[in-house]
Amino acid sequence: MAACFADVPDPRAGNARRHDFPELLTIALTASVCGAETCVDFADFAADREALSRSFLMLDNGLPSHDTFSRLFRLLDPAAFATAFSTLLDRLGEKGEGVLAIDGKTLRRSFDRAAGGSPLHVVSAFASERRLVLGQAAVGETGNEMTAARELLTLLDLDGLLVTGDALHCQTETAQLIASKGGDWLFALKANRPALHAAVAAFFADPTSDFSTAHTTTDADHGRIEVRRHHVAHDIDWLFSDRRYQDEPRLPGLQTIAVVEAEVTRDGETTTSRRFCVSSVRLTPETFAKAVRAHWSIENSLHWVLDMAFDEDRARTRKDNGPENLAILRKLALNVLQSARKELSIRRKRKRAGWSDDFARTILGQMR
């Protein structure tokens, strides 16, 4: 496992380099898999599970303290640390495919009130079918979620992937970047592109328009019934006619406009809504429905899991690069957990790995 971090630069100097750098990161990752949340937890794990650590690490200079872990994650370059994603995926024998969802999340407790620092906001790239995180980028002080997403996508191999994003990412620059790297895109369409949104909404509201027969899906749980009808249209040359305003920014390769009509019934009351999308792929109603559902798995299979199983929303690390690096570490641990013992929930796997060295080895031993 330590080989995953062999190419990450060591930020320490002098006597602070007493402990082997890849071994420190390996202990932290192993501890996170087994339920640890903080640098104090990492040090306690190293002490209490020393036999497990020594089964695959040398630990020539003894066990690291919590100060050692804290200093390391404060100094470590997050961009360099994030390169471990691709190495880890190689060693797990897993690669993302199909739909790649991009979405942002704010770590609410990471703000530093004393220093006037804002909470950390990160953008993740999530392979929905494999339930694997392929990368993470933080929103910089002078940037925003759109620019962070483009920085992240620049680092990824998008060949053959359908990249999905909410309306915030429905940008010409983002679409061009995805296309240049061999991918396709599917974006939600809202009023941040007012002319295109109004035209697409008017098209699907017109009963004489030529669009597909609906593909219908139904979900029922917790007293709530939701019926979704998915329509697509491919004959969209009219969008680029002389009726459009001059120099309007266009989405390159636009092939499909689509709508999801949702009808929700709860406690005897029914509400309806329409959500519009645009894509560079000629989607059928069925494939459109699957792609939309796959995109929202980033909420249920990543953000929700990080909050519920890893308690990320209450993580209070605030100093320097600590919040971003520990967010990366949690996602690396999640990838390890997702790839092993798929019949068990993440919560059960973390608990059992925390209780049993033998069970922990079944999770960690999958790494080639």
Image (spheres, rainbow, N blue to C red):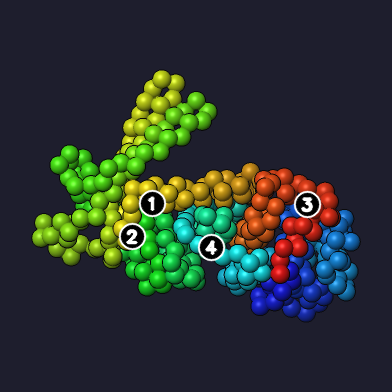
Callout 1 crowding tier (Cα within 10 Å): few <14, some 14–19, many ≥20: few
Q: Name the residue rendered at 44%, 29% in the picture.
A: 225
Question: Which image quadrant is residue 171 in?
Answer: bottom left
Q: Which residue is mark 2?
A: 281
Kind of element beneath mark 2:
loop
Q: Which residue is at the far top?
A: 268
Kind of element beneath mark 1:
helix
Asked if labels 4 and 3 touch by Cβ distance under 8 angstroms, the answer is no
Asked if labels 1 and 3 touch by Cβ distance under 8 angstroms, the answer is no
Say above or below: 352 vs 14: above
Q: Amino acid at mark 2?
A: Val
Callout 3 crowding tier (Cα within 10 Å): few <14, some 14–19, many ≥20: many
Q: Name the residue rendered at 43%, 49% in the picture.
A: 290
Q: Which residue is mark 3?
A: 353
Q: Which mark is residue 287?
A: 1
Q: Which tag, 3 or 4, sits closer to the chain's start?
A: 4
Q: Which tag, 1 or 4, sits closer to the chain's start?
A: 4
Q: Which residue is at the far bottom?
A: 14
Kind of element beneath mark 4:
loop
Q: Amino acid at mark 1?
A: Thr
Callout 4 crowding tier (Cα within 10 Å): few <14, some 14–19, many ≥20: many
Question: Which image quadrant is residue 330 in?
Answer: bottom right
Mark 3–mark 1 Cα distance, whole angstroms, equals 38 Å
Mark 2–mark 3 Cα distance, whole angstroms, equals 42 Å
Question: Which image quadrant is residue 266 in?
Answer: top left
Q: Amino acid at mark 3?
A: Ala
Kind of element beneath mark 3:
helix
Mark 1–mark 4 Cα distance, whole angstroms, equals 18 Å
Mark 1 or 4: in front is 1
Asked if labels 3 and 2 touch by Cβ distance under 8 angstroms, the answer is no
